[in-house]
Amino acid sequence: MSRHLLDARGLLCPLPVIRVQDRVAELTPGDVLEVACTDPGALNDIPAWCRLNGHRVAECRDEGREVFVTIEVGADEPKAGDRVL
Amino acid sequence: MAAQRKAVALVSGGLDSMLAAKVIMEQGVHVEGLNFYTGFCVEGHTHAIRKKDRARPKRNNALWVAEQLGIRLHIIDIVEEYKDVVLNPRHGYGANLNPCLDCKIFMVRKAYEWLGNQGFDFIITGEVIGQRPMSQRKDTMPVVVRESGADDLLLRPLCAKNLPPTAPEREGWVERERLYDFSGRSRKPQIDLARRFGFEDYAQPAGGCCFLTDGSYAVKLRDLWESRHRRDYDLDDIILLKVGRHLRPDPSFKLIVGREEGENNFLEGYRRRFVHLRTTSHPGPLVLVDGQVGEDELVLAARLAARFSKGRDAETVTVSVTDREGQTRTLHVPPMPAAQIPGDWYI
C-alpha cells in the first residue's frame, strides 16, 4: 500500500478524470492517490468517476484556486460482465 | 442459457446516446460507455473558466449519464489523433469547421477497436435518421457503417427499425421488435421515451456539444491558421480560443484579454509563455500577446489593456509589461477610446 501524488493543475475537466483513470490503472487496491487540480469541476467529476469504478473518495478539499481529491483505490477492477451500481 | 452479450455505447452526455444505451440494457445486454475527449468539448471548460458559472453546480454530463444508467464509463483522450479529423476531413465540413461525418466515422472506428480488445460484441450509438444535417442522414449513416469498419456490428437502437437488420438483431442478441423507428429532427419521441424511463434533468445542447459547430469559434480557429500560415493546433491553442476577447490589430500578433476574474485566473496559468500585460493603477484584465511585437505594438497593447480596465476613462493608466524571460517594465499610456478600436480587430 503506497501513497501517490497526481498533479492535474492547469487541466480542464475531463482531463483530470482521464489522468486519474490512467494512473489508477497502474496502482493496486489500497493505494492512495492524492490529486491536485485547479478546475473546481474536478470536485464533482473525480468522485463521480470513483463511484462508477468502485474507488473510495477519502477527502475532497477546496482551497479556492486549488482543489484536492484523495482517492483510495478499490478492490480489483470490476470484471466485464459485472454490473457496477 | 446463452452467455450475456456485451455492448459498448458511445456516450456523449446527451439524451439520445443515454436512451440508446438504456434500450439495450433493458434487453438484458451488459453495456459499458465510451466517451471521447477531443479538446473541442463545450461542457466543463467554459464553466471552469468563467467565474459567473462557479456558483452553479458543475458536472460532466457523460459521467452523470453513466451514473443514471449504472454503467462503467471509459473516457478516452483522443486530442492528438483527432487533429487529422479536424484538419483533413475526407467528407468536408458542415456549416462551420465541424467535420461531423468524419468525426462519427472516427469515433465508431475507435469503439470498434476497443470492442475487439475488450471482448465486447457490438457497438451502439444514439443516432437517429434525419436528426443532424451532416452525419445522421439516410445517405450518410451507411457511410459510417462502412468506413468505420464496424459494419453490421453497429446498432442504432433509436432508429434500427428504419435500417436493415444488423448482426445483433439477426443473431438474436437483441429483439428487433423492441427497438425504435425514430426519424427526423423532432425531439418529441426521445422526450417521451425519457419520460417512460424516468429520466429527468438530462442535457440537450442545441447544435451538439462541440465548439467546432460554433460560428465565432470557427472564425477564431481559421484566424489562428491564417496568422501562422499553417493549419495545425495543439491543445493549449484550442482551449485559449475559448477564453477571453481576441483582438488582432495586425497579422503579426493578437491579444487575448480576460473578460472577468475567472478568465483572468485561467489565463494566469498561461502567462509565462506569452508577453503579458496587466494594468497596475486600476483593476483590469490580464492580457496575453500571441505573436511578435515591437515597441509600438506594445504601447498599442498597453492602451488596449487600459481600455478594458476600470481606468478606461482616466487620462493615464499604468500598465506592467512582462516579457517571456520574466523581465517587467512599466508603461504609462492613455486608454484607447472604444470608438478608435476598429471593429475588424475583434476576431
Image: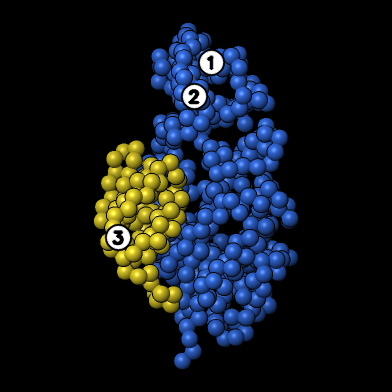
* Chain letter, colour blue: B
In contact (CB < 8 Å): disc 2 and disc 3: no
Q: Colour of chain A?
A: yellow
- Give the class, few, some or many, for how many residues have Cα within 10 Å of label 2's Cα (few <14, many ≥20): few
Q: Which residue lies furthest to the bottom in this view?
A: B1
Kindly identify the amino acid type of the residue bearing the numbered disc 2. Glu
Of labels 1 and 3, the one closer to you = 3
Q: Residue beneath label 2, please?
A: B325
Q: Residue beneath label 3, please?
A: A31
- Give the class, few, some or many, for how many residues have Cα within 10 Å of label 1's Cα (few <14, many ≥20): many
Residue B206, position in %: x, y? Answer: 56, 51
Circle 1 chain: B
Labels 2 and 1: the sequence-earlier one: 1
- Give the class, few, some or many, for how many residues have Cα within 10 Å of label 3's Cα (few <14, many ≥20): some
Q: Residue beneath label 1, please?
A: B303
- Mark 2 to mark 3: distance in Å? 40 Å
Horizontal side of B36 relative to B220 (left or right) equals: left
**Secondary element at image label 2:** loop
Q: Which of B73 and B98 is in front in this view?
A: B73
Q: Which residue is drawn at 66% across and 25% down?
A: B252
Q: Residue at x 56, y 17 (%)?
A: B298
- Mark 2 to mark 1: distance in Å? 22 Å
- Mark 1 to mark 3: distance in Å? 53 Å
- Give the answer, above or below, for where B12 lies relative to A78: above
Q: Quadrant of the C terminus of chain B?
A: top right
The colour scheme of the drawn protein is by chain
